[in-house]
Amino acid sequence: MPIKSSSKAGLPPGTLLHVGEEKAEKVNITLITYNKTHYEEKNVASVEECLPLKEKSAVTWINIDGLHNTKIIEELGHHFTIHPLVLEDILHTGQRPKMEDYKDYIFLILKMFSYNEKTIEIEQISLILGPNYVFSIQEREGDVFDPVRKRVRNEKSNLRKMGADYLVYSLLDAIVDSNFVILETLGEDIEDTEEEVVTDPTTETLQAIQTLKREMIGLRKSVWPLRELVSALERGESPLIRRSTLIYLRDVYDHTIQIMDTVETYRDTLSAMLDIYLSSISNRMNEIMKVLTIIATIFIPLTFLAGIYGMNFRYMPELVWKWGYPAVLLVMAGISIIMLLYFRGKKWL
């Protein structure tokens, strides 16, 4: 059962408590060090094993999968002098995407999305940029950083020649670009639902629209702050981010704007689809009511005739006439045909 935010009520600032769902059975720590000529990648058991690389000229990338073991996060803060409030934010998975500059390091919180069975799953990613090291801390194993890892392993890659700030840009770019994949999948689902709304709307169609709207709201809540985060990085004056990297950050900012435009377009489309659905249901109901009204209108004179000849008075003129019954049936059929022709002439049928 996930730990809720209310469990932190009354605790002092900087208390390390994992808030959220436990998404990993065990914590995995991956260490990657590289420069122009050197590359090394291995799994380590603790943060202490990364300390010998802290002062080296090579870039060190430490990736941690799993947040439920607060002791590892506490060791991270102790050995790399990370503020307790930063550690607290790392463990609180309900954080809003943001950027905080602590001079010696920059702290970033982002949201990474995955789309499974028409449901968007959101995972919090925390990044810490230091002079020559980068921490990426995730809720579980599995991410969108595989293209970055491939570039790091490639000796001819431009990433191997750049600093830790360029690595953070690459991780940011991977997260932002993954949103395009999510939006493309969502777009296909929206198109399928839109076609269903127009042709044969059902209750399941309404549920699909509501689900898509909810997913788009969650996506928007995470993408809007992401734009502010990238903008703050781009406009910041931290010595940890080189001037050459700012150009790449502008490109990421442009991508966030494109994502926001797409999200807003999809939201408008879903709102229009909901209106179309309601209109389709209303039109269908009107058609049903029209048919029932026509049937009732045809039977009104027939009921009138049947009521007259059902009174059984002794001296009714047609009561003993041998052709009375078929004559009344013919009159009733004639009335029905005349009324149907009239309704068709008025284009009510």
Image (cartoon, rainbow, N blue to C red):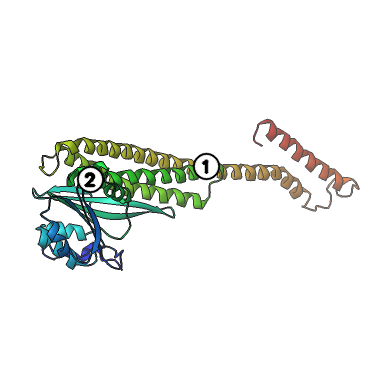
Determine the secondary structure under disc 1.
helix
Give residue 296's position: percent from left, percent from top: 66, 45
The mark found on residue 269 in the picture is none
Asked if residue 84 can be seen in this view, the reply is no
Location of the N terminus by quadrant is bottom left
Asked if residue 307 can be seen in this view, the reply is yes
Query: Dot 2 corresponds to which residue?
Result: 160
In screen coordinates, is 140 left or right of 289? left
Q: Residue at x 18, y 47 (%)?
A: 164
Q: Residue at x 17, y 68 (%)?
A: 71
Q: Amino acid at mark 1?
A: Glu
Q: Residues within 10 Å of mark 2 (few under 14, many from 20)?
A: many
Query: Residue 4's image quarter?
Result: bottom left
Q: Residue at x 41, y 48 (%)?
A: 212
Query: Residue 73's image quarter?
Result: bottom left
Give residue 349's position: percent from left, percent from top: 66, 37
Please tell me whether residue 82 is drawn above or below residue 193 in the rendered image. Answer: below
Please name which of the two marks, 2 or 1, marks the residue nearer to the observer. 2
Query: Dot 1 corresponds to which residue?
Result: 195
